Amino acid sequence: MVNLRVQSLSGFDEIRQGDCVAGLRALADGCVDLAFADPPFNIGYDYDVYQDNLDNDEYLNWTREWMTEVKRVLKDDGSFWLAIGDEYAAELKILLQRELGFNCRSWIIWYYTFGVNCTKKFNRSHAHIFHMVKDVKQFTFNADNVRVPSARQLVYGDKRANSKGRLPDDTWVLRPQDLPEGFSADDDTWYFPRVAGTFKERQGFHGCQMPEQLLGRIIRVSSNEGEVVLDPFGGSGTTLAVAKKLNRQYLGFELSSEYVDAIQRRLDSIQTGDALEGSPEPQVSAPSTSNGRRVKQHTAPTKQEDQQSLPGMDG
């Protein structure tokens, strides 16, 4: 077991074991520049120690508690990004805006194309990501740090294209080579793959893991080097690992002591300036479907077909 020593309640660059509400309450007002949270979705996922099957009111009250603390510890120009599933997306957006007073800058749809196969409903192939700010007129948004190639550059070879590319879309797609023609250069589309079991960046100790490049985009656009990035739900440690690689201070909370140890080992294995795992822009790097491997047969899924997919996918 890794022996973690908390230097002080005001110290950063660490993962702390314990309940996030208590941990957040120990922080000073306005000490965080960016918070990213990928909480449990309350759909019965089998976590290490957390029970993901609370009554509806209990889950919403608990969510209100930790979100209230997140807002308190955010600086006046800070940003809060929340990843959530269908079950509570609408309710939490209302809670964030009408009860807690956040302003919504973007409602991101992350489309990943391969969800759990279902028989009596449409397959789920997306998650919701809300970008919230405290002050609608004053917040960090480093547009030039997250630009992506435009259709003028990739498809048409148009010399008039902005060499810096364009801002990403608000629908994030896994396989751009399979996009329907309905997506155009004017759309808001982000391209990132889920971290499948065969991926190099897969940590293995946590069942749900977001890709480093997705967190990279969020951290680059909503914070600057040296600033503080918070994740109340450490999970597999992706938020903290990416923050460290991008030269941000970081602080995370995690209920499971085993996950805390694994996160610490992950943090110890990387250095500031290390490259992020995965492709920064899959639209450029992804092979065309015609050159890829064709699957001749489809086998039945090994999990229950109608199981609700995508629990909190970690920070």
Image (tube, rainbow, N blue to C red):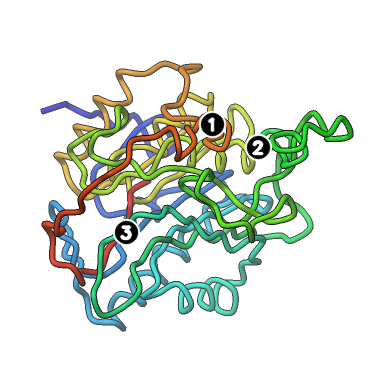
Q: Residue at (23%, 75%) from the top-left corner?
A: 119
Mark 3 vs 1, N-terminal side? 3
The residue that label 2 is drawn on is: 146
Q: Nearer the viewer, residue 2 or 6?
A: 2
Q: Residues within 10 Å of mark 2 (few under 14, many from 20)?
A: many
Q: CA distance from mark 3 to mark 1?
A: 22 Å
Q: Is residue 313 left or right of residue 127?
A: left
Give the amino acid type for the residue marked by disc 2 in the picture: Val
Q: Residue at (57%, 48%) from the top-left corner?
A: 190
Please tell me the numbered disc located at residue 280: 1
Q: Is residue 130 left or right of residue 277?
A: right
Quick one: SS at disc 1?
loop
Give the amino acid type for the residue marked by disc 3 in the picture: Gly
> Does residue 52 sit above or below 183 in this rendering?
below
Mark 3 vs 2, N-terminal side? 3
Give the amino acid type for the residue marked by disc 1 in the picture: Pro
The residue that label 3 is drawn on is: 115
Q: Nearer the viewer, residue 203 or 1?
A: 203
Q: Residues within 10 Å of mark 3 (few under 14, many from 20)?
A: some
Quadrant location of residue 181? bottom right
Q: Is residue 214 left or right of residue 16?
A: right
Looking at the picture, how far across and down is residue 244, in whole percent?
A: 45, 26
Q: Nearer the viewer, residue 269 or 303?
A: 303
Looking at the picture, how far across and down is residue 189, in whole percent?
A: 61, 52
Q: Residue at (27%, 48%) from the top-left corner?
A: 208
Looking at the picture, how far across and down is residue 222, in whole percent?
A: 62, 43
- Please identify, in this view, whether the residue under mark 3 or under mark 1 is nearer the observer: 3
Mark 2 vs 1, N-terminal side? 2
